[in-house]
Image (cartoon, rainbow, N blue to C red):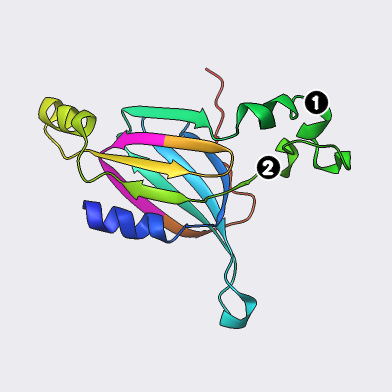
Amino acid sequence: MDRNAIQAALDDVFDQALVFHGFTDYMRDYELITYSVADPKTGIAPSFDRYLFKHCVEATITSTLTPQTWAVSLDERLVDRETGDLDGYVWGVKWQALYPGGSVLAESEKADQWERAVGIPFHEAVIEGNGHKIVLIFSDLVVSRGLQAGYSPFTVQVP
């Protein structure tokens, strides 16, 4: 996928729910699982979608919460959605809004270095939600729409 196609794919998830992100169980690719909902009047059904960032050589995740929000969000009860009326960030909702969303950088020194070293195109994307900022260096993006509810990225095998 070229930079414009990657940007178009990231535009599709603007303000949708990010329900999972992390490296795949085989540790080469990075995935985002989103839950997208349209206005019910459109007739478009909600959808779980997978954004697979292939050959991901770098993933940097930082919090988008302010220190003040962190300070009032340390209570362990906030990891449970059913906690009630505590002040702070409720971690237990188990999703975050992809706002302001994602973008592919037009120029990236890191991506250029990997491209020269490996011999395939690389891109740098920044995906930001109301909980995390995710910066990825990767070579390609594959989007799979309409995952079954309950999809799990993990297939644990004991050696």
Q: Which residue is rendered at x = 36% and y = 30% of the image?
A: 28
Q: Which residue lies furthest to the right in this view?
A: 84
Q: Give the range drawn in magenta.
A: 135-143
- Name the residue carrying label 2: 94
- Name the residue carrying label 1: 75
- Name the residue type under label 1: Asp
Query: Quarter-wise, where is residue 82 in the image?
Result: top right
Image coordinates for residue 100, horizontal then vertical, percent: 48, 51
Image coordinates for residue 79, horizontal then vertical, percent: 76, 33
Q: Which residue is rendered at x = 62% and y = 26% of the image?
A: 67
Q: Is mark 2 on a helix, strand or loop?
A: loop
| Position above or below: 146 against 81 | below
Q: Residue furthest top?
A: 159
Q: Is mark 1 on a helix, strand or loop?
A: loop
Image coordinates for residue 51, horizontal then vertical, percent: 42, 49
24 left or right, relative to 8: right
In the rendered structure, find residue 97 and report the number of the disc placed on it: none
